[in-house]
Amino acid sequence: FVTDVEGNIDFFKDYVSRSNVLDLDESDTHDLNLRLKDNNCYFVFGGDAVDKGPGDIRFCRTLVSLKRRYPKRVFLLVGNRDLNKVR
């Protein structure tokens, strides 16, 4: 479970480096390629993906890509900052 990344890619990369659930492949310089480490892992993003950081779009694409890859094991919640961007 992680929340409040707010577009800060460096913060999220640090989180992934310490995670027992996610693995990061940085060979693609445009997108972050995330994988779940094994078949017993689940990932929940608790919202506030966007707001302050320079990586809002890149981070959102990363989350959507992970959800598409693991539709039954990745859950994306919407936070107040995310909703405010939609209004």
Image (cartoon, rainbow, N blue to C red):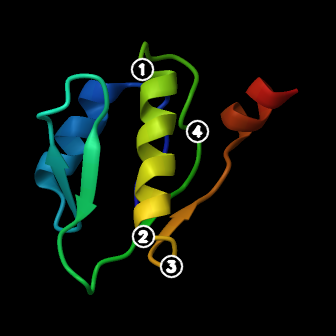
Q: Are marks 1 and 3 in contact (CB under 8 Å)?
A: no
> How far from the left and from the top, in percent, is residue 65?
44, 50
- Nearer to us: label 1 or label 3: 3
Residue that mark 1 sits on: 55
Picture residue at 27% right of the left edge, 51% below the top: 34
Say if 16 sits above or below 55 in the image: below
Q: Quadrant of residue 85?
A: top right
| Nearest to the observer: residue 39 or residue 27 | 27
Give the class, few, some or many, for how many residues have Cα within 10 Å of label 3's Cα (few <14, many ≥20): few
Q: Residue furthest bottom?
A: 40
Q: Which residue is mark 3?
A: 72
Is disc 3 placed on a helix, strand or loop? loop
Q: Position of residue 52 (x, y in %)?
A: 51, 16
Examine the rendered structure and indicate whether residue 53 appears above or below residue 24.
above
Callouts 4 and 2 close, C-beta under 8 Å: no
Label 1 crowd bin: few (<14), some (14–19), many (20+), radius 10 Å: some
- Quadrant where the N terminus lies? bottom left
Q: CA distance from mark 4 to mark 2?
A: 21 Å
Q: In this view of the protein, can residue 5 be seen by the observer?
A: no
Residue count near mark 2 (Cα–Cα under 10 Å), binned few <14, some 14–19, many ≥20: some
Q: Which residue is mark 2?
A: 70
Of badges 4 and 2, the one in the foreground is 2
Could you say which is closer to the camera, residue 63 or residue 14?
Answer: 63
Judged from the image, the secondary structure of the residue bearing numbered disc 1 is loop
Q: Say which amino acid is labelled 3.
A: Lys
| Distance in Å between CA atoms under marks 1 and 4 | 13 Å
Mark with earlier residue (4, 2) = 4
Badge 4 is on which residue? 48
Marks 3,4: beta carbons within 8 A: no
Q: Nearer the viewer, mark 1 or mark 4?
A: 1
